[in-house]
């Protein structure tokens, strides 16, 4: 909820920006706000995933996918995330969130997102997402029918498959007991 007003503002602003295809790249320019920083006076590591949400929303709205998802009552959920940091974004610094879909498999749609400032990558994340409906996960067939097939040259890197398998928790239909 801490970014609810920024999210609503981004949804409105994205509607006024030029249209994109869902397989295109999106760029959103932001500034590091006082609410984004931690005690070390740079953007808090957890904030990166929150502002990356804004980039994914921008791509979905500008491509028309967001409106289609809302009509179908589909919701996006994150299934897995990994991030690497290179430099720290400082209070007041302008930066861009660059977003693109890098592929999909039978389990997820995968995004690559970057925080870029002064032409340099400061952080990069890979996010596995799913679309869910009231009756459960939305199939790839439904997604492709609704949004179009990915470009033929869009090939998901092999390491993404390994990352997903190595980091996955059991299905919600199976137990996942905690014991240390």
Image (cartoon, grey):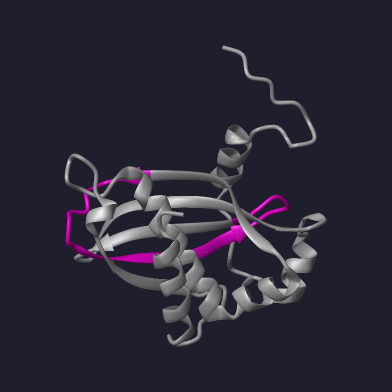
Q: How many circles with numbers are drawn on the protein?
A: 0
Residue 148 visible (yes or no):
no
Q: Is residue 68 magenta?
A: no
Q: Is residue 179 above or below residue 2?
A: above
Quarter of the figure with residue 64: bottom right
Where residue 53 appears, as percent x and y from the top left, is: 46, 60
Where residue 177 appears, as percent x and y from the top left, is: 68, 20
Quarter of the figure with residue 73: bottom right
Q: Is residue 34 above or below residue 69?
A: above
Residue at the image point whose x is 39% and y is 58% from the top: 51
Where residue 45 appears, as percent x and y from the top left, is: 33, 44
Q: Is residue 91 above or below residue 164?
A: below
Query: Is 43 in front, or is 152?
Result: 43
Residue at the image point whose x is 75% and y is 61% from the top: 140
What's drawn in magenta, residue-wise?
Answer: 84-109
Residue 122 visible (yes or no):
yes
Q: Is residue 104 magenta?
A: yes
Query: Is 82 in front, or is 90?
Result: 90
Q: From the image, which quarter does the C terminus lie in?
A: top right
Where residue 147 appears, as percent x and y from the top left, is: 68, 75
Q: Is residue 31 above or below residue 19?
A: above
Instruction: Farthest residue to the right: give it.
Output: 135
125 left or right of 44 in image: right
Residue at the image point whose x is 75% and y is 72% from the top: 72
Residue at the image point whose x is 24% and y is 43% from the top: 38
């Amino acid at each position: 909820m801490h970014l609810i007003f920024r999210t609503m503002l981004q949804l409105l602003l994205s509607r006024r920006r030029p249209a994109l295809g869902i397989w295109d790249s999106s760029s959103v320019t932001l500034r590091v706000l006082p609410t984004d920083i931690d005690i070390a006076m740079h953007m808090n590591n957890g904030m990166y995933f929150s502002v990356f949400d804004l980039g994914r929303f921008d791509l979905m709205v500008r491509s028309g996918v967001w409106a289609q998802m809302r009509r179908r009552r589909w919701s996006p959920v994150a299934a897995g995330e990994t991030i690497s940091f290179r430099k720290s974004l400082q209070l007041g610094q302008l930066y861009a969130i660059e977003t693109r879909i890098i592929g999909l498999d039978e389990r997820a749609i995968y995004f690559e997102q970057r925080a870029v400032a002064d032409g340099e990558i400061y952080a990069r994340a890979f996010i596995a997402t799913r679309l869910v409906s009231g009756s459960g996960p939305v199939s790839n067939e439904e997604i492709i029918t609704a949004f179009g097939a990915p470009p033929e040259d869009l090939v998901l890197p092999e390491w993404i498959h390994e990352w997903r398998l190595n980091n996955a928790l059991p299905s919600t239909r199976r137990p996942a007991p905690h014991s240390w």
